[in-house]
Amino acid sequence: CENLEGHRFHWRKMDQYLFIKKSTKGLVFRRLYVDDNMLIGHPTAIGDVIRQLRNCGLTIKVESNLKDYLSCKINFSCNMKQSWLDQLHLISNLEKKFGEKV
């Protein structure tokens, strides 16, 4: 199977784990870390990427309601058009352990 560039994903210098694919069906962001992937984008375009990856022999687990990625909590805006990652639980644990030093 071809690499990410062969699937028209383009690597971004700003983040070595972020790849972007533009197609007529929409935009897909692919976050890749070791053996974990996260796809964000237009549902039809994501479906195409999943089919391509499965055709390469990869096992794909699809979660439509993801709450956590690599120990980061995934937060969504009320209209579900924006999201962000946070690790407030880790900061809270550090504050409990080290107090004012954090």
Image (cartoon, rainbow, N blue to C red):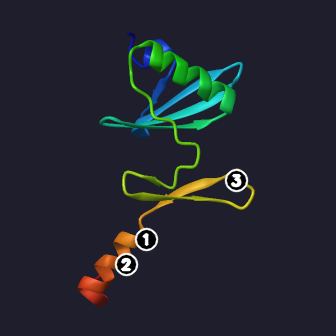
- Point out residue 50 in the picture as x, y percentages from the top left corner: 53, 24
Q: Is residue 25 left or right of residue 17?
A: right
- Point out residue 13 in the picture as x, y percentages from the top left corner: 42, 34
Any mark on residue 92, and which? 2
What's the amino acid at mark 1?
Answer: Leu
Q: Number of numbered discs present?
A: 3
What's the amino acid at mark 2?
Answer: Ser
User: Which residue is pictured at 60% across the width and 54% down the height?
Assistant: 83
Query: Considering the numbered disc 2 on the image, is that residue within a helix, a strand or a loop?
Result: helix
Any mark on residue 76, and which? none
Query: Considering the numbered disc 3 on the image, is that residue within a helix, a strand or a loop?
Result: loop
First-in-chain label (1 vs 3)? 3
Query: Counting other residues with Cα less than 10 Å from the Cα at mark 3, is it few (<14), some (14-19), or many (20 or more)?
Result: few
Tell me the quarter of the picture where residue 14 sits.
Answer: top left
User: Which residue is pictured at 44% across the width and 17% down the height?
Assistant: 5
Cα separation between marks 3 and 2: 26 Å
Q: Is residue 34 left or right of residue 20?
A: left
- Point out residue 71 in the picture as x, y percentages from the top left corner: 37, 57
- The residue that disc 3 covers is 80
Q: Quadrant of the C terminus?
A: bottom left
Any mark on residue 88, and which? 1
Query: Counting other residues with Cα less than 10 Å from the Cα at mark 2, is it few (<14), some (14-19), or many (20 or more)?
Result: few
